[in-house]
Structure formats: structure tokens, C-alpha cells
Image (cartoon, rainbow, N blue to C red):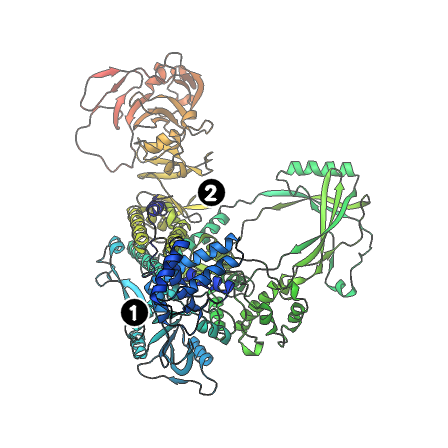
Amino acid sequence: RGKGVGIGVSFEAETVNYQKKQNYDSKIGGKEQLKAWQMIEEVSDKWGHLPRVNKSTSSHENDGRRTKNKRERGGRGGREREIVRFINVFRDDDGDAEDFDASSSSEGTLTWMERKTDLDTKSPENIRIVDQTLEHAYRFHKSEIGKGWAQRIHPGSVVLHIAEKPTIAEALARTFADEVSGYTTEKGHPFHTPVHKLQSRFMGENCQFRVTSVTGHVYNCDFEQGFESWERTDPVTLFAAPTRKIPTTGSVLRHLSAVAQGCDLCILWLDCDPEGENICFEVLETVGQKLARTYSQYRRVYRAIFSSLAPVDLKEALNKRPGLEGGLKMPDINVSRAVDARQILDLKMGVAFTRYQSVFLRGRFNRLSAKTISFGPCQTPTLGLCVKRQDEINSFEPESFWRLDVRLSLPFQPMTINSEADKAHIRTSIELVWARGRVFHHKVGLMLLAKAKFDSKMRGVIRDVNSKERLNGRPTALNTTAMLKAGSKGLGFSPIETMRTAEHLYTSGFISYPRTETTHYAKNMDLLSMVRAHANNPEYAEVVQKILSNPSKARPKAGVDAGDHPPITPVRSASRHDLGPREWKIYDYITRHFFGTLMGDCKMSDSTVVLDVGSERFTAKASIVLDPGFTDAMPWLKPDETAFPCEFKAGETYPIQRLDLKDGLTSPPGLLTESELIDQMEKHGIGTDASIPTHIKSLCDRGYVSLQAGRRLAPSPLGIVLAHGYKTIDCELIVPYMRSTVEKQLSKIAKGELTYDVVLQHCLRSFRDKFIFFAEHSKTFESLFEARFSSNSSGAHSRDLSKCGKCRRWMLYNPGVRPPTLTCSTCDVTYNLPAGGTIKILGRECPFDRFEVLIFKAGGPNGISYPLCPYCFNNPPFEDIAKNQAKSTNGMSCVQCRHPTCPQSSVSLSLCLCPYCRRGSLVLDPTSRAVWKIVCNHCDRLIKFAEGANKVQMTKRKCEKCKAKLLHIFYPKEASRLPDRNDEIIGCLACDPIINETTEVVKGRLTKAKGRRKGRRKGRRRHGGSDVDGPVQIQYNSGAGKSRRMKQTIKM
């Protein structure tokens, strides 16, 4: 998991002792207020309207009844009386604030208690509802918000309506304007968006309406001044840098300030999603100070809840009593703060990583000198999903398989089909499928084929014939993700094109709000009325008639209620001539999907034939549609129909026309499609339903992925290297885990379970730790880029050298960098190689990882050479070697490996324990050839044989004296140094005097010789060569500066 900074670990610890205080005066529009209103509405509807409190009762009677009620009801009489008065005002349009007078009579309370006990006295549910209603209503009534919401609207009040787009503002003006007087539109300096003025009614009073709009966010989040420079600002300081809100354009603020002058109330008609909630408070930053003080601060601003621009829906959103579900409410500050936190986190993490990696790579690679290598908290995990699929394709190895294929000789006897009209589209065939599927061994397949032919005598027996009905379930209601996937997969539109088209249809009044996660229709939705609106549309008249002819079937499948918006549905009927080509395709899909949810399931009849050919079993299937159901509205989902070419009965035998063995290859998965990517992003919680199209578009615009045929996403070389670099350094930067965890914490801010500061500070600390770790290991990043992009310091001698053990493709050898590297461009992995020598291919594969084994040889006559596996050299498979890599190689070579069967391992080549370092083993260098050598796999000691030996082999026999393995040495007769001109000898390196006389011990070189060094060398010099320690048998120089000679016996 890379750095290991568990982004979600310490969050849990911080939330254990944190309990959110329910404060009605500060939590504007919170769930408790809404719950109070809903429960009051529920109880009042159940028990009827409560009687008005009689205000003529004297104070003395009040005191007496108060005491009596308090005594009879356990001391809650006065509290309940206040609640009843509050409920009376809430339910009565003529009520006013005077009805809350504490000196009022308690007759209403007695009536309330009588109702409480009269209706279903023994029902615990009724008692629970009333008790909870009393509690919530009392707390809400005592709060400042409750007092503010109880105020009356004065006639002639000026109400300001602010929408998110000019088209929505115009729709509001058309809906609320009187048919006779209509509305007027003003547009001029400084107004950059229209202002519609009209007379209408609000809360039962005649008011003046001003309707205008913004164009999205009013403010952008950015750093304070002083952090703009990429060169002078250390990216790590950005995590603690202060941020500010900068106006998108000054004209928007001037427009809002001017239009709010003289207004008493403000109603916000912004999108009902978290971003819209955040824009509410951005608008209030300017508008809130300009509103008149006619009403209390809790009554000046309302938030409209709507899902479509149909006039009936807009009027209901305006006229429904505040606080009720679907009615006007206060903006939710918690949801807005969650959006603020997301903006700050995305800004700081994105800018810090983008600046660092862009500057880091620009100075090292020519092709990236003019490129900004961007990083995004959502963009990068999305890229990781695309690269992961590409890696699966690259690492896939096709595998041969074999399957039995059988064909029967059948008489021509077509099956009876339901009607003549059906014969045209039903395909008659029989495709027998082997029950074993396939086998992966050719000999096994041949054996099964021969056995089947012998046992069956080339005749097949019908073992069983059966048929059963099957239902293809109708779809659930349409949400944003399903619409985006259908647009990409079925219509050929990109997610961003689908989203923009749907938004245009929404603002034009054709469909409901297109951003929703809900797939469940609310109980109060009149679905049949929505269907009847299309009865006169020739495009859908036939489907509408089928739905209305059997309304009992129009029961949609239960979906998921996310609590945001209703599912996407058509709002008004349209034809091809009313919309453009792209708009019509999206509208037609939404409408047909809506119809399909109200129709029955598709009923199929599946027939299965089981055939035995000897001991092998085959099956064949055919399907016929009995009831098309929802596929009449969605014909692209109608399944293909097939029928058998003749009637089959159990026990019948048929001659086999052909029985043979067919081969094939397994195929890799395809590239990730846009539809699949959207599905995975939703599954892992990357982005929201509104931001998913933007993230996919960003990957294409920045060149990290490219769009291929079939709307498949192919990662570019830059995208692959970036993803592999993040994964190598800190995998949490590229996997969806971190982003989904952050989204869960942000949702807790929106729900009021966590505070804004707790989540923000914890996330910033975690992100800062990850950034520091990333910067410390950026050298790994550089090595990955060297294979794909030309380095400013690399040479021009790169070439293909060996094959990768993972993808089996050639790897690029780059000797112009230090250390030299071997890079697989397919896997985007770079392996370091030892420096100061030459690299060649040995011609064998490593048994651990199937990488080709290389030979490293240092320069000079005393240069040490050894075989190595590129993967094992960088990733030793043994823990002790990984922690303490040999000083001689700075990595694990093959002569250090302990693989039991590899011919290059120390197990196969080890002669004995090194008598010089007492830690390594003396191993035979099988690649030395001209001058055979024995080297230590830990220190730099080198034992050279005299020139002329043809071959040196190590035997399995051991020396009886020192237990070292015996050597078998071959010499040519004409150049033999053995007594009597013998051409071979078997003996011990240390104990045999003849072999010992033909060897010498020198200090080997690990790098190329750079010229002769000046100064006095220690030790003996023989043959005019390097430092020589003498014969192996008994004597060697025990250390620098010591002339005393010692004897040492070689031991295993």
C-alpha cells in the first residue's frame, strides 16, 4: 500500500468521542426541523385539525387548569399547551404570532389529549407518534427558526427569485405570471442576465416578483496571493497555504447587488444537488446584505425544491408550506461546507502534485518540456482503472484449448411455430455444446474423442428434452449513471455529450432533472397521467395504448431511493421535428425507458435437448418469446429467437455426421469501454453522477487516454508511465480506495456527523505525508520515464536486449545512464543493472520469473563476471539477501541464488566456503571460457586457472580431506600443463598440489579498468598483472599492511 498512510484509519478514532450537538438556532434547515414539520403534518392529518385555543379564559382559570393538567399528565401540561398552540398556527392559514401567547387557555390541550386517547387507545404506534411530535414540535417552536417561520407575509412584499441558468429563470417567469398582465423583461447595463418582473401570489398574499439568474458558481476557490509562482513556491507549503473565494466575474456580483436592492424575500431556484446548495450560500454572500429587514433572518431566504420545469411542479414547489417534504426550506449549511471542503482538498492536492511532477519531468525529458503533467484526486484513480485493464491485456498469455464438435444428420422436419408471421425472424438451428466446455491438453482431447467414437458407434442418443419459462426482468427507473452508460454504449455519445444534451432537454422543459442517483418512483407520482401525456404522439401511441389498456401491470420494479431527486422521466411530449438529432435520441431513450419500467417482464420459453455421444454429453438450447413485455417499448433489448430444426423426443437416436476435435486460443479482455468505466467509477465512489463525465473528458483532453473504435479507452504511453509510477511509489495515489474514503468523510460533513475542520485537517495531513513520500522517491518516477521519453542526459545507444518475463516482449537496454537500465515499455517497469561492465544474454530463463538471464562482465583481465536475472537482481526472492545485498554486486546475482535446480545458482556452482571473507562461497564462473575463473559471491577475490584449459567442470564428488567439491579439468595435449602431458585431471582445488600450482588468487575488479594507478601496491606481483595473493593451497596475504604469511585450510 505504498506509503501506508491509512487515509481512513485515524478518522474512526477521531469520530468516536465526537457527537454532533443538535442546535436548532444554528443548524438552519437541518433534519430535525424537517422531521418536526413532517411529524406535525402526519399527526394532524391523522387526528384532524386541532381546535383553536380560547383566549378569553381568565388567568386564574389558566393557573388552576395548568396545575391540574400538570398533575394529571406528569408535569407536562404547560409544555403540551404551548405545542398545541404552535400546531394550531401551523395548520391554520389565519393564525398569527399572537396565538403563541403563554397566557392562553388550555382547552386545546384537553381536546388534544382526548383525541390522543380516543383513537386507537391501545395502539403503541399512535402513542409513540404523538409523543415524538410533541417533543420535536416543542423544541422547534422554542427555537429562533421556528419563531421566524411563523411570521406572516405582508401584502406587496418584493420577492427575489434567483435561478441557476437564464433559461430556468424564464421558465419561472412564464409559470408564475398572470395570463392577462404577463411579465416584463429588463436587460441592460449592468445586468448581464435578464430580470423578469411580474405580479403574483406568495403564501396567500399579492407580491411583486423579480426573477433573474446566475450562470453557475459565483466564486472560485484559489490560493491567497503569494503562492502563484511555480518556481518560488515549494509545493509542500501549499497544503498549509490559506485559500480564498474569488468571484468568477465582477459583473455577476454587481448584478446580484443591484437586483436585490429593495427586496424583502429571496427564493433560490438552484439545482437541488450539493453544488447547487453551495451556490446558494455564494449568492447569499452578496444578496443577504441587500435584503430589507422586514422579516427575521430565518424568514428572509428560502430554498425551492423541484425536479422538473413543468408548470405544475414549479407551482407546487412555490406554494407548498415551508418545512414540509418538497416545500420551501432553508439552505443546508452542512451540505455547502462539504462542497467547500472538497474544493479545497482537490485544489491543494492537485496543484501540489501537478507543479512538482511537471517541473521535475520538464528538466529531464525533452518531449515533456512544454507539457503540464496534471494530477487530480479523481482523475488519477480513473486513469488507474484504464491502465489496469491495459496491464491485464499485456500480461495475458494465450493458451491453446481443444473441444469436441459434433454434428447430427437430421431429417427435414421443421418445428411447429406459433404463427406464420413469426417464421420470418425465428432462426432454426441446433448448436450442440460440449458439457466439459474445453480441455487444455491435446492428448486428453484426443483420448476423449477416440473413446466417444468407440462407445457411440457414431450414433447420438437423446437423453432428455425439456422446456421451461423464463422472465427477463424489466428495468428499474432511470438515473444518471444508467443514462450515461446507455448514451455511450447504445447511442455512441460521450458521457459529456450525453450530460450536456440531457441538461439542455431539462432547461427546455422536456425531461426532469438529469442528475439523480434514485431508481425508485415515489408513491405520490401519478405515473399513468405522465403516460397519457404521450397518447397523441404517433411515435409512442401504440406503446401508450398497451400500458393504459392494462393499468394493473403498470407497477414499476422497486429501486433505490437515494433521497435526492426523482428518476429521470419525460415531462412533456415531443416529436422528431421539435428536437435536433442528438436531443431526439436522448429524449427517445429516456421516454422509452420510462415506458419500459411500467410494462411487464419479457416472458421466454427455453427448450433444452440433452444428447449423449458415448460417455460424452452435449446440450442444445432454443428460445422463443411468449410475451415481449417491456421490449415493445425498448426493442433493442428484445432477445433473439431460435428454434430446433425438428422435433426431438427422449430415447431417439440419430446418426452422427461429424465428430472431431477443434482447437482454439483463449483471448485477452478488451479495452475498457466508457460504459464499463462509468460503472466502475460508480462502484468505487470516484466522483459524483454529475462529475463523472468531466473526469473522463479530462483524461482524453490531457492525452492520458485516447478514444478507440467502439468507444473504448486506450491509455497512452504517458498515461501508462504515470499510472505505473504512482503505483510503484504509493499505490494509494492510483487506486480508488483513497478517493472513495475521502468522499465518505465528506458525506459525513453533509449529514452533520463530522465537522468541516476535523475532516479537512485530517485529509490535508494525510495528503501532505503522501506528497513528501512521493517527492523523496521521485527517482523511481524518472527511471520509468527514461524508457518512453528521451532523457536530456541519456545516450543514443539504446537497443532491445532481452525479453520480459511477464509480457514476453522485448525490453530496451539503455547503457547511457547510471546505473544502466533495462525497461519493459509494455509493463512500464525499469530494472537497474550493474554499472561498469558489459551486458550480454546467456540464453537461459530464470526458473523464478521466466526472465532471460544476462551475463555481466567487468573490464580487464581480472574483471569479475557473473550471471544475473534482471528481476531477481532488483527484487531478491530471499529476505536475507534483500536486506543485506552482497557488496560485490549491489543486487542479487545468480551465483547468490539458492534455487535448488537452477544450473546458475550457488547450489549448483558452489565449490566451498570462501577462505578469505568466510561469508561467501567460491563458485565456478561457467562463462569465463578463455581463462577459467572461480569467484567469491560475496567478496572480490578471484581465482584464475592457467591459460590453456579447455573446460573446467565441478563434479558431485567431494574431497575427503576438506569436503570441497572436486574439479574436472580438461587440457589439450599439445598445450597441457599436467604431468606426462595428460589431457585431464580430477582433484581438489586446495588439496591437490598439481591443480593448486596452476591457479593464482587475485583481487578482482567490479568495474572497467580506468588506467593504471600510481603508487606502491601491496602484496606480491606475478605474471606482471594485478595484486596477487599467491597459490590457493596454503598461503595468501591476510590483510593490508601485514607481511606475515599465514596458512589456511579451505573448509566447506
Residue 38 in sight from this viewpoint: no
Residue 581 in sight from this viewpoint: yes
The reply, left or right, for residue 492 in relation to residue 277 is right
Residue placed most toward the observer, 351 or 741: 741
The reply, left or right, for residue 378 in relation to residue 1038 is right
| Residue type, numbered disc 1 | Glu
Q: Secondary structure at mark 2?
A: loop
User: Vertical placement of 412 versus 936: above or below?
Assistant: below
> According to the image, label 2 marks what residue?
806
User: Vertical placement of 891 versus 344: above or below?
Assistant: above
At horizontal 39% and vertical 15% (from top left) the residue drawn is 963
Where residue 176 appears, as percent x and y from the top left, is: 45, 79
User: Vertical placement of 308 versus 716: above or below?
Assistant: below
* Labels 1 & 2 near each other (Cβ < 8 A): no
Count neighbours of disc 2 (C-alpha within 10 A) and say few if under 14, some if 14 to 19, many if 20 or more: some
| Quarter of image, res 526 | bottom right
| Residue type, numbered disc 2 | Lys
Q: Quadrant of the N terminus?
A: top left
Instruction: Tally the marks.
Output: 2
Count neighbours of disc 1 (C-alpha within 10 A) and say few if under 14, some if 14 to 19, many if 20 or more: some
Real-space Cα distance between discs 1 and 2?
58 Å
Q: Residue furthest top?
A: 961
Residue placed most toward the observer, 173 or 119: 119
Q: Earlier in the sequence, mark 1 or mark 2?
A: 1
Q: Quadrant of the C terminus?
A: top left
The reply, left or right, for residue 50 in relation to residue 453 is left
| Quarter of image, res 424 | bottom right
Q: Which mark is residue 285?
A: 1
Where residue 664 appears, as percent x and y from the top left, is: 62, 46
